[in-house]
Image (tube, rainbow, N blue to C red):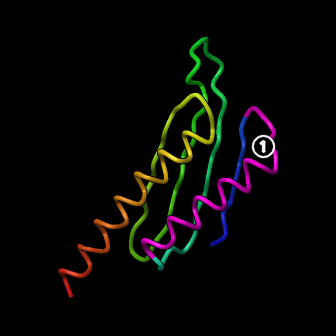
């Protein structure tokens, strides 16, 4: 799956991009009809340690899912967002199966 990545207020290194790609490839095992995915990574200028924000938009046929997570590190936020996406995609798959 092609992942479009944008990093706001910082430059993402290749390790982070590879981690993101690998994690989203695992999400695709739960729902194979993913059309595209957009990832926005932001660093918020606050005194809080949880200032890394990851927003993932996944497009599937006839629907779109958006998950936004804020954590201490980008890896933790990506992992948390992908877990949420996996649950939502499994629910969507069940919904389609029941309609058929």
Can you give x and y, in whole percent of width and height, for residue 34 in the image? 50, 74
* Magenta residue check for 14: yes
Point out the image quarter for the C terminus: bottom left
Report which residue position mark 1 lands on: 12
Q: Quadrant of residue 7?
A: top right
Is residue 73 shown left or right of residue 91?
Answer: right
Point out the image quarter for the N terminus: bottom right
Spot the residue most to the left: 98
Which contiguous range is marked in magenta?
9-31
**Position above or below: 75 against 29:** above
Q: Quadrant of residue 61?
A: bottom left
* Magenta residue check for 47: no
Spot the residue most to the top: 47
**Position above or below: 44 against 14:** above
Is residue 58 shown left or right of residue 87?
Answer: right
SS of the residue under disc 1: loop
**Position above or below: 69 against 31:** above
Residue at screen point 55% across, 24% down: 50
Can you give x and y, in whole percent of width and height, for residue 26 in the image? 54, 66
Is residue 82 shown left or right of residue 51?
Answer: left
């Amino acid at each position: 799956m092609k992942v479009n990545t944008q990093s706001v207020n910082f430059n993402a290194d290749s390790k982070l991009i590879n981690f993101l790609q690998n994690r989203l490839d695992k999400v695709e095992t739960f729902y194979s009809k993913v059309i595209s995915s957009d990832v926005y990574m932001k660093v918020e200028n606050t005194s809080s340690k949880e200032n890394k924000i990851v927003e993932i938009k996944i497009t599937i046929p006839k629907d779109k899912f958006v998950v936004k997570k804020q954590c201490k590190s980008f890896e933790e936020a990506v992992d948390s967002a992908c877990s949420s996406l996996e649950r939502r995609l499994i629910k969507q798959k069940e919904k389609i199966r029941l309609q058929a």
